[in-house]
Amino acid sequence: MPIRTLVVDDEPLARSSVLALLARDAQIEVVGQSEGGAEALADIRRLSPDLVFLDVEMPECDGLDVLEMLGPSARPNIVLVTAYDKYAVAAFDAGALDYVLKPFDDARFELALARAKERVKASATPSGARRSIAVKSNGRVSFVRIDGIDWIEAADYYSRLHVAGRTHLLRRSMAELERDLEAFEFCRIHRSTIVNLARVCEVTPDGNGDYEVRLEDGSAHRLSRSFRRDFQMRVNGSESVTPAIRGPKARRAARRP
């Protein structure tokens, strides 16, 4: 199946360069071009592309604004295009799969495209069919069961899986893992933390107006205000924050006669 791709850039020459590089790949079907952020938002919603090459610096509404306004649930696979590597961390935090720098290096562009194609293909696989994550270490590949993960933390351009007292380093962004784990009991509570909701014991105030999430493994994690609403809805079915929120096991025990 072709990978339906949208190219977004306010500079015609930059758009032409991306289109020329994409034309080399027979799997890519360019379904549209957008000249700005507002137009990109409309085109993404109208065309539902599998993949978007999205410029960062655009007038009025830039690429990072587009990512934020789309939200994780409506966001296609996105590769950010920028002239400045200072946006690298922001790109991954905002949910981009990768980024490429202008002027384009053919090899780097092809690598970003290959990663994006793999992600698109993985998205087409029913999430229920995948119950483990492959982790490469010292030339070997091991498989970590998704339901065995306690929590995940950001580690520069990697993510670190915490599983029963052990850690595994994974070359995946937090945004990628957040999307991959949507069908499971995982929730992002901070820009650098994703927790397994089945491992949550309680949530308590920290005395500074914020909240702390405690897990069964004894670890404690800050609940960021920007992720609080989603966490509350996932845990309590309510947007209100209570002084102490008990995790799934505690709630089940409380319901027993």
Image (cartoon, rainbow, N blue to C red):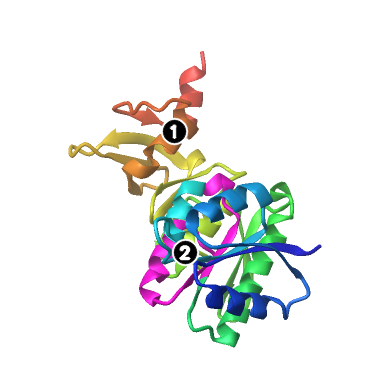
Residue 159: give its label.
2
Identify whether 117 is placed above or below 75. below
Name which residue lies at 68% across and 61% down. Answer: 120
Residue under pointer 1: 247
Q: Is residue 73 magenta?
A: yes
Name which residue lies at 25% across and 39% down. Answer: 210
Image coordinates for residue 62, horizontal then vertical, percent: 43, 59
Say which label, 1 or 2, has the lower sequence index: 2
Q: Is residue 195 magenta?
A: no
Rounded to the nearest angstrom, the CA distance separating label 1 from label 2 is 24 Å
Image coordinates for residue 118, horizontal then vertical, percent: 68, 67
Q: Nearer the viewer, mark 1 or mark 2?
A: 2
Identify whether 85 is placed above or below 243. below
Q: Which residues are magenta?
A: 71-98
Badge 2: residue crowd in 10 Å (few <14, some 14–19, many ≥20): many
Identify whether 46 is placed above or below 154. above
Query: What is the secondary structure assignment of the residue under circle 1?
Result: loop
Asked if residue 238 shows in the view, the reply is yes
Figure quadrant of the N terminus: bottom right
Badge 1: residue crowd in 10 Å (few <14, some 14–19, many ≥20): many
